[in-house]
């Protein structure tokens, strides 16, 4: 998945056809990406091309909802500024968007404590009652971030690790916690280190809203352990201000599940397997350590 690449010549041809006033800006490759490939366009913009699967649909969701959400968000996000339509050159929709300056957190982890406040304020602004026509969170159904299922399959990825038993206990506590009783909230849905931007050790932006949708806010609140330095969770929840004990339990369970996902994808990358991301393995183990340290 995502092993093939688009060439800069395609981007330039698309711009000349649909947005010719941007076609003379410098185009530069951007490392990373999975469902989408990204290019820098001049100093302030980027071009995002979907590669496969659900990516074109997710791009349409970003085009529709991100300009609306961005008006109330407290951190930079990749707001679409131009829409690219399918054509003979390229069969999918594509986007010209604002470039968010910095490095992804899987390359440069967040180290500064004040990022707990930045993330808490960002999610407090994002988590509003979702309108009736908002997309459902695509990876989950039901009123809880955590549900009985194949957690044990993911737990096998750290078989023999000294934290495996504690990870299972956190998950079981999360599943047993009361479910979200409120109106589904608008979520980012995929807050892991490759989807947030860091400058000088501080959280500086949030990207890749392809999994946005309505659901249990605990899905996003898991970022307290996935993204922030150890010991930051309490400050994060103080600033966020709306999480109860059950929500925190579900969020911690989701963080442990995401840690196992990150470890598995990272290990695949370390072993040279398709779709793997080697920087995700240390991020996954760091997440696991933070989530279990506060149990």
Image (spheres, helix red, strand yellow):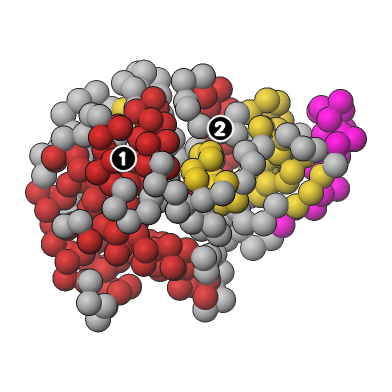
- Residue placed most toward the observer, 137 or 222: 222
Mark 2 vs 1: CB contact within 8 A = no
Instruction: Magenta stretch: give its range.
Output: 5-25
Magenta-span inclusion, residue 22: yes
Query: Mark 1 falls on what kind of element?
Result: helix
- Residue placed most toward the observer, 25 or 103: 103
Residue 94 visible in the displayed image: no
Magenta-span inclusion, residue 82: no
Query: At which x and y percent is residue 90?
Result: 75, 41
Q: Which residue lies under the disc numbered 2? A: 76
Q: Which residue lies under the disc numbered 1? A: 236
Relative vertical location of residue 211 with respect to residue 172 in this rendering, above or below: above
Q: Indicate the quadrant where residue 121 lies.
A: top left
Query: At which x and y percent is residue 91?
Result: 70, 40
Query: At which x and y percent is residue 49?
Result: 67, 43
Which residue is at 34% across, 22% downward?
128
Side of 18 relative to 181 (left or right): right
| Position of the N terminus by quadrant | bottom right
Which residue is at 47% across, 27% downward?
74
Badge 1 crowding class, 10 Å Cα cut-off, few under 14, some 14 to 19, many 20 or more, is many
């Amino acid at each position: 998945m995502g092993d093939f690449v688009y060439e800069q010549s395609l981007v330039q041809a698309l711009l000349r056809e649909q947005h010719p006033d941007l076609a003379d800006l410098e185009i530069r490759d951007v490392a990373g990406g999975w469902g989408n490939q990204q290019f820098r366009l001049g100093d302030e913009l980027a071009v995002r091309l979907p590669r496969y699967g659900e990516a074109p649909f997710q791009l349409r969701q970003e085009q529709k909802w991100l300009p609306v959400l961005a008006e109330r968000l407290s951190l930079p996000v990749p707001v679409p500024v131009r829409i690219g339509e399918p054509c003979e050159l390229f069969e999918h929709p594509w986007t010209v968007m604002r470039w968010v300056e910095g490095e992804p957190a899987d390359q440069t982890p967040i180290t500064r404590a004040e990022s707990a406040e930045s993330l808490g304020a960002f999610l407090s602004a994002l988590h509003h009652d979702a309108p009736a026509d908002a997309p459902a969170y695509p990876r989950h159904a039901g009123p809880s971030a955590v549900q009985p299922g194949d957690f044990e399959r993911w737990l096998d990825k750290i078989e023999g690790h000294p934290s495996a038993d504690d990870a299972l206990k956190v998950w079981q506590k999360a599943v047993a916690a009361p479910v979200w009783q409120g109106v589904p909230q608008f979520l980012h849905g995929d807050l892991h280190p490759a989807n947030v931007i860091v400058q000088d050790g501080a959280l500086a932006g949030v990207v890749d809203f392809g999994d946005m949708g309505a659901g249990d806010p605990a899905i996003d609140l898991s970022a307290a352990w996935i993204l922030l330095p150890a010991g930051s969770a309490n400050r994060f929840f103080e600033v966020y201000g709306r999480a109860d004990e059950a929500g925190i339990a579900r969020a911690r369970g989701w963080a442990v599940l995401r840690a196992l996902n990150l470890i598995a994808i990272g290990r695949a990358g370390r072993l040279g397997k398709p779709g793997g991301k080697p920087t995700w393995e240390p991020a996954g183990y760091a997440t696991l350590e933070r989530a279990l340290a506060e149990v």
